[in-house]
Image (tube, rainbow, N blue to C red):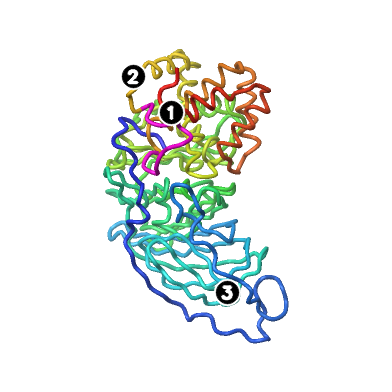
Amino acid sequence: MKTYGRPAAFAVAGLLAALPACSQSGGAGAAAPTGADTARTGVAGPAFRGGHPAAAGAGDPYFPELGNGGYDVTHYGLTLDYDPGSGRLEGTAEITAKATEHLSAFNLDLLGLKVLSATVDGRTAGFRQDGQELTLLPHDHLRKGSTFRSVVRYAGTPEAVTHDHGWREGWLRTDNGAVAFGEPTGSMSWFPGNHHPSDKASYDITVTVPKGVQAVSNGRLLEQRTSGDRTTFHWNQAEPMASYAATVAIGSYDIKTSRTRSGIPVVSAVDTTAGVDEDGAVLGRFPEIMQWAEERFGPYPFSAAGLIVDQAADVPYALETQTRPTIPAAIFHTTNVVHELAHQWFGDSVTPRTWRDMWLNEGFATYAEWLWTEDHGGATAQEHFDRNHAKAADDDEWDFPPAQPPTAADISRQPVYVRGAMVIHKIRRAVGDDAFDALVRGWTLRHRHGYASTEEFTAYAQSQTGRDLGPIWNSWLYGDGKPA
């Protein structure tokens, strides 16, 4: 995520505890199995009943209730029907997952929408909603190692997640549609899932809207069809994606298509009411920025690319929605495109293991801005570094080390972005340009379509360069206050 002006801290601490409490149950419940039942786990014989409830959170240091334990999602099939006039969303989520434990029940994250029915492996499942926690009780317990499919039907008017300083995320209504911003918790406002960045999956997102309205999402457009007064768009994101990077943008867009020099199809959607980039100056540079980024960071990790420019006036930040970053019209400029495109490598392909590792996203993406200006006749990375290091010791840039934000409210503050970029520059200065370039490209290839932690990065940097980078970690990455 990239912000300008950087208002108050991204105050999400305590968010989950403050969510409105509600509960409901549904489904026919799980009837007692008979000896003739066959568990839908690929194992013949009597139904398996040796499971236990899975954890209702992934144990993230900042969002302990976000995500869930006991299973790993491999694919989401989301079928959405949206009415921009009323704001009502109807959805069906088909979730394919692998059990990592013997399970009698498991949780999904879903906030503000009512579940209508649920099945697991084709059989009616009991369910219970309590705040953001949706608990499913399958008819037959799930055996560890088995693959299972859950189908959840739900509906309602999605609620935006609003933070203390007024910023919003989640499913956000616009003048002519809606746009979904998911970082760090907003994706649970429009579909049920395992909403922690460490559980990535492929996606099919099918959206039906009134005829004349468009729906843009991640990946490649497989089908567009109109029936009567409704049009359906089917998008496929084949490579693994963290749920916070999933998006849907609904409205009136000028769709621009092209290909990069390496043959990647580019689909960009510009809100027709935005009134930006009328001469194509920014969009026209997209192929150039893509080629530059590939030269700097390694092969582009996805099979589709593009941008979404939306008139979301009350959202003061852009987001690295996978393959198609979303940038509000008010801040649509080349620097932001560079930043969000860099996130396709740092954040989307190589995803943080926990939200504590967010500096790996934002430090690299901010440093990409510095590299861009250096490579295009502007300020050098060293000049950016010096300008920031010249700030007084009581500047908020030095409030905490980038790898240790004190609370969830701090993960999108200056030290994570700018001081994170300064860590990257210190590594470059310590090892030299050639070793640094090899390090960056090697890192993005080693963890391509996966996730990684700060500890994994520091170990990799030292092993690949053969240098003792401990002083950088001690002073710049973990040290308190302004480093000398």
Q: Quadrant of the N terminus?
A: top left
Q: Point out the stretch of residues depicted in magenta.
A: 397-410
Q: Secondary structure at mark 1?
A: loop
* Mark closer to the observer (3, 1): 1
Dot label at residue 1: none
The residue that appears at 47% across and 23% down in the rendered structure is 422
User: Which mark lies nearer to you, 2 or 1?
Assistant: 1
Q: Nearer the viewer, residue 201 or 59?
A: 59
Say which amino acid is labelled 1. Answer: Asp
- Quarter of the figure that contains the C terminus: top left
Residue 183 on image: x %, y %: 42, 45
Question: In this image, 103 relative to 235: left or right?
Answer: right
Q: CA distance from mark 3 to mark 1?
A: 54 Å
Residue 335: x and y in percent read: 41, 26
Label 1 sits on residue? 480
Q: Which residue is mark 3?
A: 122
Measured in 3D between alpha carbons, the distance from the residue under mark 2 to the one under mark 1, in whole angstroms, is 14 Å
**Residue sitting nearer the eye, 443 or 248:** 443
- Res. 388 image quadrant: top left
